[in-house]
């Protein structure tokens, strides 16, 4: 009886091992690429980048106006163009390629399949559609807090620079050796 139970358990474990191994199998490149496509990740990255650019632009303008009130509209326009050109040249396809091995490292095939199923669903697609707006609104909501933090950081950096200048101006001059 005991031998029969042991044989049954061994037989079941051998029969189930391919199923268990498959669920723990690493995600393939194709699995991750399929997930990225279902998630419209290329478009999502572009939208989030554009949203971040708008937020950054507003924060930089506000900070520059406070710190350098003499900044002209032409200088702001030039800076804005520089930021826009930089973002336009952002290598999204290359970044997605770089992300594939990371996803493969951390997610199994069953993880990626479950995520693909979710993001292909109506709820998953809604989240993907709403994510850029939610990200933008979240950044706007957090903007004042970030601006306050940026102001404190800039004040501290200016104070440190002033302290360094003061130390250099009051430091004794090294004696020159005239031998």
Image: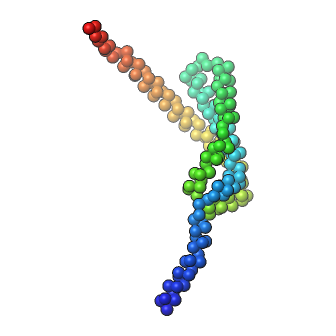
Q: Position of residue 166 (x, y in %)?
A: 38, 18
Picture layout, residue 168 above or below residue 131: above
Residue at screen point 30% across, 10% down: 176
Q: Nearer the viewer, residue 3 or 142?
A: 3
Residue at screen point 61% across, 67% down: 22
Picture layout, residue 148 above or below residue 116: above
Considering every residue shown, the one lying at the far right of the view is 122
Considering every residue shown, the one lying at the far front of the view is 179
143 relative position to 88: left or right = left
Please state the total of marks drawn on the protein image.
Answer: 0
Residue at screen point 65% across, 43% down: 94
Q: Nearer the viewer, residue 36 or 121?
A: 36
Q: Quadrant of residue 31?
A: bottom right
Q: Nearer the viewer, residue 72 or 44?
A: 44
Residue at screen point 59% across, 19% down: 69
Can residue 139 be seen in the rendering of this structure? yes
22 relative position to 157: left or right = right
């Amino acid at each position: 009886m005991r031998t029969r139970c042991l044989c049954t358990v061994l037989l079941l474990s051998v029969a189930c091992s391919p199923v268990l191994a498959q669920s723990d199998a690493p995600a393939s490149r194709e699995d991750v690429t399929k997930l990225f496509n279902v998630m419209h990740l290329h478009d999502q990255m572009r939208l989030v980048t554009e949203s971040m650019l708008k937020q950054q632009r507003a924060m930089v303008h506000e900070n520059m106006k406070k710190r350098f009130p003499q900044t002209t509209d032409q200088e702001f326009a030039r800076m804005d163009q520089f930021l826009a050109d930089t973002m336009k040249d952002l290598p999204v396809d290359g970044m997605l390629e770089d992300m594939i091995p990371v996803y493969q490292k951390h997610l199994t095939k069953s993880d990626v399949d479950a995520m693909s199923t979710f993001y292909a669903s109506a709820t998953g697609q809604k989240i993907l559609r709403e994510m850029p707006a939610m990200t933008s609104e979240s950044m706007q909501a957090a903007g004042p807090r970030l601006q306050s933090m940026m102001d404190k950081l800039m004040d501290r950096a200016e104070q440190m620079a002033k302290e360094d200048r003061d130390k250099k101006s009051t430091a004794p001059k090294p004696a020159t050796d005239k031998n």
